[in-house]
Image (spheres, helix red, strand yellow):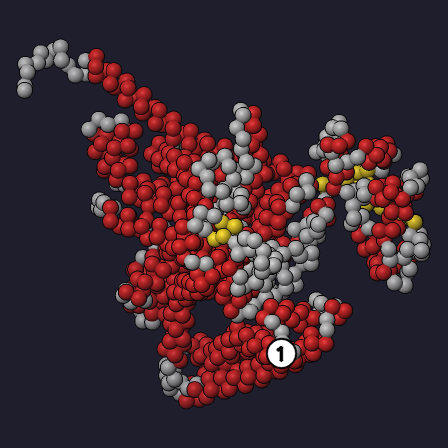
Amino acid sequence: MSTSFLLICLFGLGGFSYFFGRRRIGALTRAARVKQHSRDVYHGSFVALCAVGVPLIVLLAWAGLSPLLLDAMLEDFLRRQSPDLSLGEMGVAMAKVKAYFSGALPEAFTGELIRSGSAYFAELRSASNQARSVAITLLALGGLAFGLSKLAPRFTARPAVERVFNAAMMMASAIAILTTIGIVLSLIFETLRFFDKVPVMDFLFGLSWSPQIAMRADQIGGAGAFGAIPLFAGTMMITFIAMLVAVPIGLMSAIYLSEYANPRLRGIAKPGIEILAGVPTVVYGFFAALMVAPFLRDSGADIGLALSSESALAAGLVMGIMIIPFISSLSDDVINAVPQTLRDGAAALGATQSETIRQVVLPAALPGIVSAILLAISRAIGETMIVVMAAGVAANLTANPFESVTTVTVQIVMLLVGDQEFDSAKTLAAFALGLVLFLITLMLNVVALYVVNRFREQYD
Amino acid sequence: MTDKIDIRSANPLAAQAYQARLKKRYRAERRFRAYGLAAIMTAGMILLFLLNAIIFASLPAFSHHYMRLDVEISTDYVSAQTPQEGNYLGLVRAALREQFPDVTARRDKRALYKILSLGAADGLQKRVMAAPDLVGTRVSLDVPLSDDIDLMLKGLIDRSLPQSDRIVSDRDLVWVDKLLAEDRITRKFAFALFTNGDSREPEMAGIRGALVGSLWTLLVTLIVSFPLGVLAAIYLEEVAPKNRATALIEVNINNLAAVPSIVYGLLGLAVFINFFHLPRSAPLVGGLVLALMTLPRIIIPTRAAFAAIPPSIREAALGVGASRTQVIMHHVLPLAMPGILTGTIIGLAQAAGETAPLLMIGMMAFIVDVPGDVTAKATVLPAQIYMWANNPERAFVARTSAGIVVLLTLLLVVNAAAIYFRRRFEKRW
C-alpha cells in the first residue's frame, strides 16, 4: 500500500473512530444511568487519537528512516556482488540502480550488476512496504480496540485528550529549537570536515579564492585556493553600497510619513512601500542584471568610465532598493513609539518641526533606528538572489565599485548548484561559508537586540 | 555679566539678527521637509519604474506569430493506425517546402526550416492523435514561427542592421516578406506560455510545470508549518510557564526569523537529502525547507494575535468552568483566527517568492513534465524565472518578465486577500 493510500485510510479510520466513540459513550451512559465525566466530543477524540496517533507516528518514522535502511542494505548487496567497487563507483552504481528501478534509465545502459541490484532493491522495497502495511494496520486496530475498551461514563477522557494536545504543543515549540540545532550541527560538522582539508587560517585570512576541482590528481592548482577574504570584502562593499541607498531614503521616508504626511499620502505611500517589501528577490535580481547593470555600463561608457557589466554598483543599488521598505517600516514603528509629549514640549520651547525631529524625536528613537539598520545589514549580507544574478563569480579583491566582485552567498550557490560529490573540499567550503554567514547574521541580530534593550528610554 | 540693555532697541522679536536666524531656521525646515518628500518620491518612482520596466519587457511574451500552412497529411509520414509514431515535423516541413518551390538545395532547405519553431508540429500531432481519420486529408493550420523571426516581426530585431549584426539573415527576410505579402502570418495570444512546461526553445517554454511545482511545494509548506506554527504559538503565549526554557525558545524563534534563507537551503541539503536520503529536486524537500523557514514567520504574528486578545475573555471562560484547553480552543483561537490567517498567508507568500534555499536542494533542474506528486522532480516559479534569466537567448528576456508578471500578480492577489482578511475580521478590543 502506498504512503498516500495509508494516510487516507488512517484519516478515514480517525473520522470513523471519532463518530463511533461518540455514539458508543452515549449508549454506555444511557445504560449506566450515571453522570458522564467528559463530554461526548472528548470520548470521540480519545478513541480517534488512540486509533490514529501511534500509526501516524510510525508511518512518519518509517518514511524518514526506511530509505536509510534500504540504501544501506543495497550498498551491502552491491559490495557483496562486486567487492572491488571504489567509493565513487559505488555511488554511481547506487544511483543507476535506483534510476533503472524507477524506469528513468533504459536497459541498454545497465549491466548485470545494476539489474540484479535493481531486482534486490525491488524485493526490499516490497518487503518494507508489506511490513509497513501490516504494522500500521495492527497498530491502528489495536489502538481502536484499546480506546473503545477504555470508554466508560466516569472515564476522564477530557484530561487525557488535553494531555495529548499539550504534548503536541510542546513538541511543536521544540521544533524551533531542533531547527536551530539542526542548522548549527549540520554547518559545524561539514565545516570541521572542510578544515581537515583546508587549514582554518588559510580559509579565514587567505587572499585568493579559486575553488576548482581537479580533473586529474596531478593538475596544477588542482587543489584550489580557499581564501575567503575577497568574498568578505565583496560582501562588505555591496552591503555598504546598499546601505548608502537604503538608509537615507528609508529613514527620510519614515520620518516624513510619520511626522509630516497627511493621512491620504500615508494611506498611499505605506502600502506602496509594503509592495516593494513583497517583491521576491529573484525579481530584483532580474531587474539588477538585465536593466540596471546594462544602463549603468552604458552611461558609464558615455562619460568615459569603464564599468563591468557585473559591477558591485548595480548589485548594491538594487539591494539598497530592496532594503528601503525594511528600514522604513522598522523606523516608522520606533518613531511612532516616541511619545507625543516630547514633541509638544519641544514645540512649546519654540522649536520648528524639523528641529523637534532632529533634536528630540530622532535621539529618542536612535536605539530603535540603529537596531533597524543593523538588522538591515544582516539582511543585506544574507541576501542571495540579487547578487547571484547581478554580481560576479570571480573573486576580485578590489575597492573599486565599478568592478565585478563576488560575495559569500554567490559562492555558496556556485559551489553547490549542479552535480556534486559530497566529500570534496569544494562542497564542504560552501558549508564553511554558510557557517560564517550564520554567525555574522546571528551576531548582528544579537547586537541589534542588545542596542534596543540597553539604550531604549522608557517614557511612560 | 549683565550689561544694561535698552529694552526698546533690544526687542528680541524685532532684532535683525533674530529675523535672519528665524529665516534660516524656516529654510532649514523647508529643506528638511523637501528631503523627506524626495525620499518618498524616489521610492515611489523606483517602484513604478521597476513594475513598468518589467511589464513592458514582458509584453512580447504574451503573443506569438503564427504562419498558416496547408498541410497534406500524407500516409508517407503518418499512418492512421499508429498516429503517435508519425513524423509530424516532416509533414509540416513538406508543406513549407510547397510554399517555397524555388528552395531546392539541401542547405537552403535546412535554413528554410529554421523559420518555423521546433514545436511547429505539436498542434498538428495533437489534432491527428485525437482524430486519426484526418490522415490522408488536407488541413489548414497555424504553426508557430521560430523565436528569432517572431522577435523580428515584433520589431525587437532591427531589420535595417547589416546582416552580420542580426540573427535573422537576409534570406529569412525575403521568405518572411513573401509570407507577409501572402497574408499568411498572424499574431495570436501565446497560450503556450501557460499550458507548456519548460523548454529550450523560448517560443515553447511555459510556466505550467513551475506553477504546479510551486503549488505542490507550498502545499507541503502549509501542511507542515501551519499546524506546527499555531501549536507552538499557543504553547508559548498561553500555556508555557514563564521560565528560562521558554525564554530560550522565544529568543530562538526571533533569531530563526532573521537567519538568511540560504542557510535553510544548506540545512535542507545536509539533513533532508544527505542524511535522510529524500529525493533531490522534489517538492517534498523544498516544502519542508520552506516550512522550517516559514515557521517563525507564522509563530510571531500568531503570538501577536493571541496577545491582542484581552485577558477578560479568558477569565470569563475560566469563570464559567472551562478548562484551559477549552478556553483556548473555544474562545482564544477563534478570536485570533483572522490575525493567524493573515500571518500565515503573508508567510506563505514570502515562501512562494523564495528562490535561494531551493537552488541548494536542486529545485532548478530543467524539467519539461508537469510534476505529478510531491516526490517527482520539479521546479518552482521563482527558480524558473532564475533559469530563464540565465538563458542567453534573446526571446527569454520577455519570457522571464512574463514569468515575473505572473508571480507578482499571484503574490499581489494573495497579499491583498490577507489585507482584506485583516480589515474585515480584525477586532479592536
* Residue drawn at point x = 59 percent, y = 52 percent: B383
Instruction: Give the answer, above or below, for where A274 lies relative to B246.
Output: above
* Element under disc 1: loop
Circle 1 residue = A83
User: On the rendered structure, is B66 left or right of A4?
Assistant: right
Q: Which residue is the extreme one toward the top?
A: B9
Three-letter amino acid code at disc 1? Pro
Q: Is residue A227 above or below residue A246?
A: below
The image shows residue B371 at horizontal and vertical percentages of 65, 61
The residue sitting at 81% across, 43% down in the picture is: B114
Q: Is residue A365 left or right of residue A297?
A: left
Please give left or right for residue B301 compared with residue B349 in the image: left
| Closer to us: B335 or A378 | A378
Within the image, what quadrant is residue B159 found in? top right
* Residue A217 visible somewhere in the drawing: yes
Give the quadrant of the N terminus of chain A: bottom right
Q: Position of residue A230 (x, y in %)?
A: 45, 45
Q: Is residue B340 visible?
A: no
Q: Position of residue B241 (x, y in %)?
A: 29, 67
Residue found 33% across the figure and 58% down from its top: B251
Towards the viewer: B413 or A418:
A418
- Residue drawn at 33 percent across, 67 percent down: B239
Q: Is residue A364 left or right of residue A405?
A: left
Image spot of residue A251 (x, y percent): 37, 37
Chain where mark 1 sits: A
Q: Callout 1 environment at 10 Å: few (<14), some (14 to 19), or many (20+)?
A: few
